[in-house]
Image (spheres, helix red, strand yellow):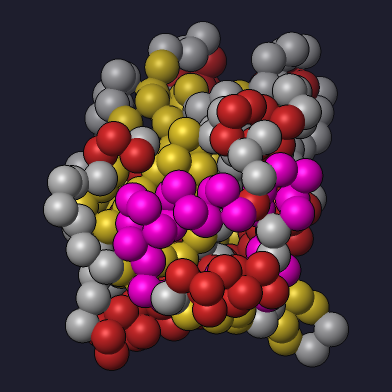
């Protein structure tokens, strides 16, 4: 899969293509349906498929400080869309200048002149251009005029529930990682670099890998979780604590992973956590001994979770 950033990265002589557009944060099941449709159309037409996304999130440019919790990094999104068969992952930097571009100018400048779009696939509720004036109806109108087709794909629902990035963020924020996984089609993943902690876990007999996470990462609610710990191709079971260490009057919110049945220093390494199940909420214990006993129970419950899912 090719990866482009910015209009200048589009190769000279680029031919016609099928394009799908969106932020695609989370690449949830609804997104996957849309992307699969675009890939299928591209194959039917004998053309490459291009997924266009934006960085940073448009809300951060339009309303600084309003960046939503990020479900997937750009790198993770690229990995996921490659698995769906997309041939080009195209990141268009979102700027104030871009936000002020009229919708018809965006279509002409980006889709027609640079990507030579033959078919564009978007969600039914997709909007674009200055003040979100563009929609699927405008795309169809411009398509008739300039020789491309436009398709809208409906939102994915189960019963009364419609899957969306906003819904999944609310599940993660509430610690309902099971509901988040149902909507995503896979466990919610948190990535980060392992940094030095205060070594308290080691003194208690449960050394942890402390994750430094990206600024806007969607971190689940405080509590203890059974997670899959991913490191250099390995998938390991881990009991993960998120919170401020109330037993020791901590102030800094941390993500700490105790990897089961392995003694290894992950300092400086990039790792990821897939959240499988929430074990309990965060609570304060009167003594370190009570905390150690509870951690032992958390570890055994984590082990049981992985035995049931293996």
Q: Nearer the viewer, residue 12 or 183?
A: 12
Pinpoint residue 34: horizontal percent, then vertical percent. Answer: 51, 75
Is residue 189 visible in the rendered image? The answer is no
The residue closer to the viewer here, 245 or 299, is: 245
Q: Is residue 81 left or right of residue 163?
A: left
At a point 69% along the width and 58% down the height, the residue shown is 134
Task: Judge whether 94 appears above or below 21 on screen.
Answer: above
Q: Nearer the viewer, residue 6 or 29?
A: 6
Q: Report the side of 234 relative to 212 (left or right).
A: left
Q: Residue furthest front?
A: 145
Residue 143's spot in the image, x, y percent?
A: 52, 73
Q: Nearer the viewer, residue 59 or 294?
A: 59
Magenta stretch encompasses residue 264: no
Is 256 placed above or below 239 here?
above
**Residue 110 lies in the magenta stretch:** yes
Q: Residue at x 30, y 19 (%)?
A: 268
Indicate the quadrant containing the C terminus: top left, top right, bottom left or bottom right: bottom left
Identify the residue at image location x=36%, y=36%. 6
Percent x, y for residue 141? 62, 74
Asked if residue 142 shows in the view, the reply is yes
Disc count in the image?
A: 0
Q: Position of residue 188 (x, y in %)?
A: 54, 55
Start and end of the magenta stretch?
A: 104-133
Give the left or right position of residue 178, taking residue 80 as reference.
right
Quarter that holds the N terminus: bottom left
């Amino acid at each position: 899969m090719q990866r482009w950033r910015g209009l200048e990265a589009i190769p000279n002589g680029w031919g016609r293509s099928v394009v799908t557009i969106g932020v695609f944060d989370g690449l949830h099941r609804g997104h996957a349906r849309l992307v699969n449709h675009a890939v299928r159309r591209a194959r039917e037409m004998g053309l490459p498929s291009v997924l266009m996304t934006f960085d940073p999130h448009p809300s951060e440019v339009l309303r600084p400080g309003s960046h939503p919790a990020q479900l997937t990094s750009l790198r993770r999104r690229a990995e996921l869309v490659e698995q769906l068969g997309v041939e080009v992952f195209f990141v268009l930097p979102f700027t104030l200048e871009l936000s002020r571009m009229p919708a018809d100018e965006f279509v002409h400048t980006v889709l027609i002149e640079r990507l030579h779009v033959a078919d564009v696939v978007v969600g039914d509720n997709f909007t674009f251009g200055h003040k979100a004036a563009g929609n699927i109806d405008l795309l169809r109108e411009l398509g008739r005029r300039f020789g491309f087709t436009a398709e809208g794909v409906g939102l994915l629902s189960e019963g009364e529930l419609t899957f969306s990035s906003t819904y999944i963020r609310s599940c993660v924020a509430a610690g309902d990682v099971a509901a988040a996984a149902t909507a995503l089609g896979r466990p919610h993943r948190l990535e980060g670099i392992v940094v030095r902690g205060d070594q308290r876990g080691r003194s208690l007999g449960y050394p942890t890998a402390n994750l430094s996470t990206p600024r806007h990462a969607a971190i689940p609610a405080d509590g203890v979780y059974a997670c899959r710990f991913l490191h250099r191709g390995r998938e390991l079971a881990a009991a993960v604590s998120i919170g401020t260490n109330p037993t020791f009057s901590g102030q800094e919110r941390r993500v700490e992973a105790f990897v089961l049945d392995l003694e290894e220093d992950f300092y400086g390494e990039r790792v990821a956590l897939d959240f499988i199940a929430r074990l309990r909420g965060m609570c304060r214990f009167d003594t370190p001994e009570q905390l150690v006993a509870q951690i032992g129970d958390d570890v055994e419950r984590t082990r049981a979770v992985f035995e049931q899912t293996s």
